[in-house]
Image (spheres, rainbow, N blue to C red):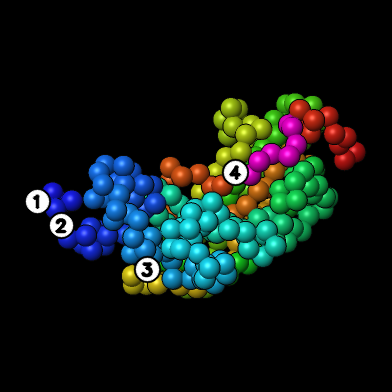
Amino acid sequence: MLLEELPEDCIESIISYTSPWYACRLACLNRTLASAVRSDTVWGGMLPSDHALVYPRAAHLSKREIVEALAEGISLDQGRQRYVLLRRSGGICRQLSVAAILCTLLAQFITIDPMVAHLLAVCWLEVTGTWKCSLPPGIYSVVWRLKVANPQGGRCQFLSWKKPLSFVVNTSDDQDLEKELDLGQIQTNVFEEWFEFEVGQIVVRGKGREVKQLHLFFSIKEVDCTYWKGGLFLDCLALRPATAQDEPVYTKPSRADWKKMRVRPGVF
């Protein structure tokens, strides 16, 4: 039996377990599938249970319009957080901007964008924070989005990273992650380009699609005060479904050209 030969309500139920990307692809195959995809049953099945809290305007929109809005991304907490329904996997990606994170250091961060921080030079680096958010059950990758200036270029040539950065993430249900990133060993083609560093994976336990509350404690540290280091850019911390590795963390439009940033005065 072909899919289009099934009762329409069965077709709608099956498509609701896919993702926005697959639903749109199926709608292009024939009129039967296109008719099924127009149903609120399809789009309602793709929505997380907390969509009304995340997106208050949802009460005035159709299910499909809500999915479209969430797929574009919803800004929360005055732009400090972002909530995205991933188009291909249908999972939820949560992002926490560095603007919402406490930085303790013996120097200064400067901002090149309201939500991006640039470390000029520092002896002691300690970034700590907590994050409460909601996610559907599943396995999620904990990812930092960052960038490193070329240590051999411009005013940054006296800076180096002799010790690795230590990334730590703990959850309220006793899941502990720790991983080091040696910036001195990264590939040269990564310099001056945003990249993602995965600290590890956590499990959100539950049944069905009902969202669960998650409380994270995280930190980035490099506290060797015997030398100066710098040229680090921090964008955000993200929780992304482990099955959606091919869907990158949201990239904001750049407000500053890198060539202009390189000629800014150093801290000394």
Q: Which residue is mark 4?
A: 251
Mark found first going from the N terminus, 2 or 1: 1
Q: Main secondary structure of the magenta part?
A: loop
| Residue linked to disc 1 | 1
In the image, residue 97 above or below residue 60 = above
Alpha-carbon neighbours of circle 3 within 10 Å: few (<14), some, or many (≥20)?
some
Report the mark closest to the observer, 2 or 3: 2
For marks 3 and 4, give the CA distance: 27 Å
- Callout 2 touching callout 1 (CB < 8 Å): yes
Type of amino acid at the residue the image marks with label 3: Arg
Residue that mark 2 sits on: 6
Callout 1: 10 Å neighbours few (<14), some, many (20+)?
few
What SS does tag 1 mark? loop
Residue at 49% over, 67% down: 51
The reply, left or right, for residue 208 in relation to residue 77 is left
| Percent of width and height locating residue 69 | 52, 56
Which residue of the protein is positioned furthest toward the right in this rendering? 268
Which quadrant: the C terminus?
Answer: top right
Magenta highlight range: 252-258
Circle 4: residue type: Thr
